[in-house]
Amino acid sequence: MNPKHTSEEINSYFIEQIKDYAIFAMDTEGIITTWNQGVEQLKGYKEEEFIGQFYGMLFPEEYQQAGKPENELKVAFENDVYEAKDWRRRKDGSLFWANIKLTAIYADGKHIGFTKITGDNTEQKKLQDQLAARQQSALEHKNTELQRINLDLDTFIYTASHDLRSPILNIEGLMSILKEELDTANALNDTTEEIVLRVVDSVNRFKRTIADLTEISRMQKGFSENPSDEMINMKEVYDDIIADLNKPFSLKNCFIHTDLQVYQLKFSRKNFRSILYNLISNAIKFQSPDRDCLVTIASRLEEPYVVLSVKDNGLGINSRQQQDLFTMFKRFHDHVEGTGVGLYMVKRILENAGGKIEVESEEGVGTEFKLYFPAAV
């Protein structure tokens, strides 16, 4: 090292001759006071064009108009440093993606200005953008594939349910004829009648499964067609459901209490009725034989949701069963009819609309479902 040069001079030469980074100093108002070769390399300004100018000229026009240069100085002064990756402007007006560090400088505790270091990350950003574009393209391709697979699955479900309906009806008719023939031939004893009844019961369960598959197919189709929402009155839908449930006297041993703090909901009426019907009918079906059936239906506003809860004091389920509660065709009680599709559809309908469902249950105590519907804006 040449002893004729002081460390301050060497440091100055070092900064001036760096070409990969624009390094310069400013006074407290942002007026440029120094220059290095990196300024010309990255920004295109010679020393005489650069020193004495407000550093805001290095920003895109819209940034200047928005007061961004002044704001960066303010942040750097308040926090001692400002760091960012953002667009910056060259002398010829072109933009480049810059890595920026603006530092407040002090002497004897007094603020005397700022230093600015700028690097060109344009190539890195270009690679990042290309990678992001490829990932987006791959994601879109995957989504297209999933949509095709879902369409194929929906078609299969519809075709299978349609094609199975005819032979099942034939079996049902033949069993009816067989029972009559056995009765006519005096061959219908306890054993043969039990066999016939078991076959008929199996046929009925099969018919219910086909009906559920058809309903799932319709639900999937409804998702793709985005059923229109409307402002519905939850009390009116509830009253309509209760009227239906009362027809076969399902409610004769069950008391339902309502506490609807929110009446209005923007949602598909058909889907809301399906959801509420499923939960009320389940509460009735799975009531406990050891106590009077009590169901509480309540609604309240919990931004950003309208929360509807359906609580019963029925059989309940244990924590292990709750993990599979919303799985298709999953059942935990066999003493009542059902296929295990209802709660699956409730969850799918809610989640497709941007909502969610939660459950709290204790075996032998009861169950509470909490349904979160997006609140209308």
Image (spheres, rainbow, N blue to C red):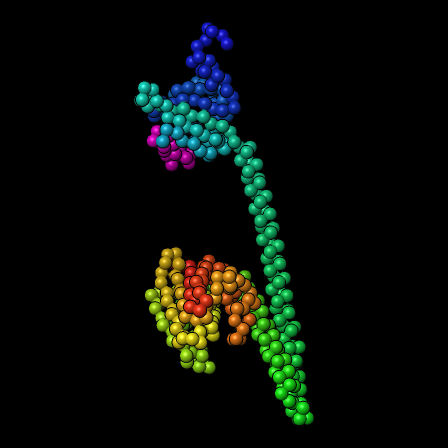
Residue found at x 47% / y 74%: 285
Residue 111 at what x, y percent from top left?
A: 32, 23
Q: Is residue 223 visible?
A: no
Residue 120: in sight, yes or no?
yes
Q: Is residue 193 left or right of residue 284?
A: right
Q: Nearer the viewer, residue 122 or 369?
A: 369
In the displayed structure, would residue 31 be above or below residue 126? Answer: above
Tell which residue pokes out farthest to the top in this image: 4
* Horizontal and vertical percent position of residue 96: 50, 32
For the point 52% across and 24% down, the residue is: 20
**Magenta highlight: main SS:** helix
Determine which quarter of the picture holds residue 57: top left
Q: Which residues are magenta?
A: 60-78
**In-front residue for pair 256/320:** 320
Give coordinates of residue 375: x percent, y percent.
Answer: 39, 59
> How many numbered circles does the render carry?
0
Residue 292 vs 325, above or below: the answer is below
Depth check, front residue: 261 or 192: 192
As drawn, is 152 to the left or to the right of 240? right
- Of the 4 image quadrants, the one containing the C terminus is bottom left
What residue is drawn where x is 36% and y is 60%?
301
Q: Residue at x 48, y 61 (%)?
A: 319
Compared with 362, 27 (above or below) is: above
Q: Position of residue 76 (x, y in %)?
A: 37, 30
Q: In the image, is 343 to the left or to the right of 204?
A: left
- Magenta includes 334? no
The answer to whether 136 is drawn above or below residue 115 in the figure is below
